[in-house]
Image (cartoon, rainbow, N blue to C red):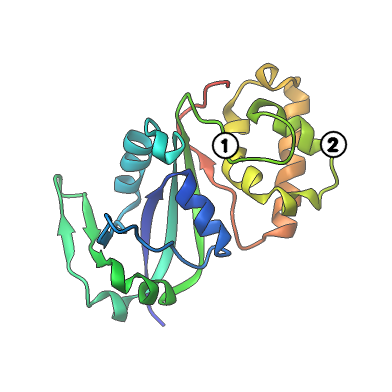
């Protein structure tokens, strides 16, 4: 089946809902959201994630770029809309068609980039540590703990990568070792879900 890769920038709450679907689909639209907007290129998604999501409290001060593959034959039923600059191209999928759109996604939705605003604090956690202390806390657990704390690892990994080691209570070598430990544990547990690459530099929290 021929597919085309589409992109969608999402805030933290929507990202958590996508993860809750096992990365198989996007959540239903709210009543005031009659249209679902996937975009046609990664740079447009990056502009939205970085410029719109990171300062937005409703997005949890974060923007995550998702990419996903959809049947090209199915996509022929949607018109591509250009809004603003020529690269700002998106599809307009009516909310009532989103469930069918999700069924046409081939393979998992992948989180490819993470952008953070200075006020980002991450998902709610049972780990008992704030964002800046979570990398150190997770390193002390068994590798299988990434399954229990998968939202923390998936959505905070980029922040831990960028935030200074001393702001996380770690030395540089300790930070590198902890990130590598979690990366290897993640690949073993979730081989089809890549960890997103960090975008703009994170600020210590």
Q: Earlier in the sequence, mark 2 or mark 1?
A: 1
For the residues labelled 2 and 1, the Cα–Cα distance comes to 20 Å
Q: Are marks 2 and 1 in contact (CB under 8 Å)?
A: no
**Picture coordinates of residue 116 (x, y %)?**
47, 33
- Name above or below for residue 141 compared with residue 163: below
Q: Which residue is at 75% across, 21% downward?
A: 170
Residue 53 falls in which quadrant of the image?
top left
Q: Which residue is at 71% across, 27% downward?
A: 133
Q: Nearer the viewer, residue 38 or 165?
A: 38
Label 1 Cα crowd, 10 Å radius (few <14 / some 14-19 / many 20+): many
The residue that disc 1 covers is: 122
Nearer the observer: mark 2 or 1; the answer is 1
Q: Nearer the viewer, residue 39 or 36?
A: 36
Position of the C terminus, as image quadrant, is top right
- Name above or below for residue 106 compared with residue 149: below
Q: What kind of element bears circle 1?
A: loop
| Residue 53 image label | none
| Residue 140 image label | 2
Q: Position of 134 compared to 162: left or right?
A: right
**Picture coordinates of residue 191 (x, y %)?**
66, 61
């Amino acid at each position: 089946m021929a597919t085309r890769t589409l992109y969608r920038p999402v805030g933290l709450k929507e990202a958590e809902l996508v993860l809750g679907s096992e990365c198989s689909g996007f959540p239903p639209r709210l009543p005031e959201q009659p249209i679902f907007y996937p975009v046609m290129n990664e740079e447009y998604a990056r502009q939205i994630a970085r410029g719109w999501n990171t300062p937005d409290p409703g997005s949890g001060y974060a923007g995550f770029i998702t990419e996903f593959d959809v049947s090209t034959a199915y996509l022929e039923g949607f018109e591509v809309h250009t809004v603003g600059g020529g690269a700002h191209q998106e599809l307009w999928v009516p909310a009532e068609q989103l469930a069918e759109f999700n069924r046409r996604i081939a393979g998992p939705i992948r989180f490819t980039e993470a952008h953070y605003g200075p006020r980002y604090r991450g998902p709610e956690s049972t780990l008992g540590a704030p964002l800046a202390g979570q990398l150190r806390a997770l390193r002390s657990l068994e590798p299988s703990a990434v399954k229990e704390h998968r939202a923390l690892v998936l959505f905070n990994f980029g922040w831990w990568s960028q935030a200074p080691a001393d702001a996380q209570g770690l030395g540089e070598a300790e930070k590198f070792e902890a990130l590598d430990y979690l990366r290897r544990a993640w690949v073993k547990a979730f081989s089809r879900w890549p960890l997103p690459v960090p975008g703009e530099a994170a600020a210590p929290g």
